[in-house]
Image (tube, rainbow, N blue to C red):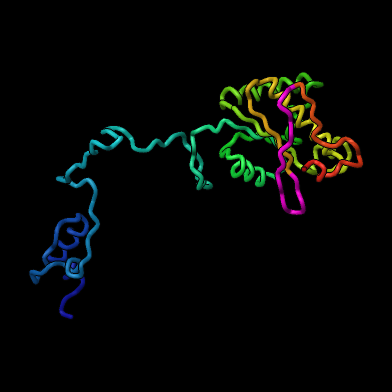
Amino acid sequence: MTGSLASLTGAPWYTDRCRARLTGAGQVKNKFGGEGRDEQIGLQRPALLGQPGDRMILPSSDSPHRLGESAIELGPPLPMVSYHAMERWHPERIGALALYCSDGRWGEAFDEFCHRHLQIPRYDRWAVPGGPAWVATPQEDPALHRVIRIQLDFLVRAHELERVVLITHYGCAWYGHLLQRSPGECLSAQAEDVESAAAVLQGWYPGLRVEAYLAMRQHEWVSFHQLDIGDELTRRTHLWPRKSSERTPESLFP
C-alpha cells in the first residue's frame, strides 16, 4: 500500500464523513462524487429528537389532554412491580355480601357458586372461622357484639348492601373444635346458627335480603343446598333433625 492509516484519516472526505455521522447531517458525498456507503445499502441514520426546524405536533381537539398537562399520573413512589393483574378494576358496587368460613379449601367453590349461580360478581367477602356463627352468637358477649355491629353497619351503609348470603359448610373445623363432635353431629348446631344469624341481620337491617346455604362435600365434589330460614322473625323453623339417629346429611334434602 502506498498510503497509511494516518494519511487516510487525514483526508478531507474522511473527516467530513465522520463529522456527518456524529451530527446526523444529510447525505455525504465521497471523493468519487457518490453517496456514502450507508445510503448505498439503504441504511438510515437514527433521527435525533428536537432538531431545529422540526414541526411541533399539537394535541388534536379530540385529545383529553391540553398543553402543559401530563398524560400519565405517576402517583406516589412505589417499589418495582411484582405482578400485573389480568383482571381490571371495576368501580361498580354489587350490593351483596357473602359471609362464610375462612377455610381456604372451600374458597374457590364459594366464588364459583356466588358468581355463576347467585350472579353476584365482585361481591363483598366476610370470611371468618365458622362463618355465620359470629353473627349468631354475640348476644352473650357484648364487646364482640359491638365489634360485629360496627363492621356490618359500615358495610351496609358505605357499600350499599341489599343482600347477604350466609354459607356454612360440612366438616367445619370451628364447630368440630368447639363441640368435639363429628361433622355430621355438628350440622344441627350449624343450622341453628344460620337461622339465628339470619334473624339477627333482619332485625338490625329491616328490608335486607338474607339467604342461607349449606355447602356439602362428597369426596372431592362440592354442592350447595339452600336452607329454609323462614320469612318471619318469630318463626322458629328447625333446619336440621334434632334426633341423633336422624342427623345425616341426606335428611336435610327432600
Left or right of 114 on screen, residue 62:
left
Q: From the image, which quarter does the N terminus lie in?
A: bottom left
76 or 29, which lies in front?
76
- Residue 209, given in percent of the width and then of the height, sits at 64, 28
Q: Residue at x 79, y 29 (%)?
A: 237
Q: Residue at x 51, y 45 (%)?
A: 87
Left or right of 38 on screen, residue 246:
right
Q: Residue at x 65, y 24 (%)?
A: 152
Q: Residue at x 65, y 20 (%)?
A: 206
Furthest residue in direction bottom, as rendered: 1
- Residue 12, given in percent of the width and then of the height, sits at 12, 64
| Residue 233 in sight here | yes
Left or right of 249 on screen, residue 202:
left
Image quadrant of residue 74? top left
- Residue 190, given in percent of the width and then of the height, sits at 80, 35
Report the span colored magenta: 216-233
> Vertically, is 110 above or below 29?
above
82 or 116, which lies in front?
116
54 or 224, which lies in front?
224
Q: From the image, which quarter does the C terminus lie in?
A: top right
Image quadrant of residue 107? top right
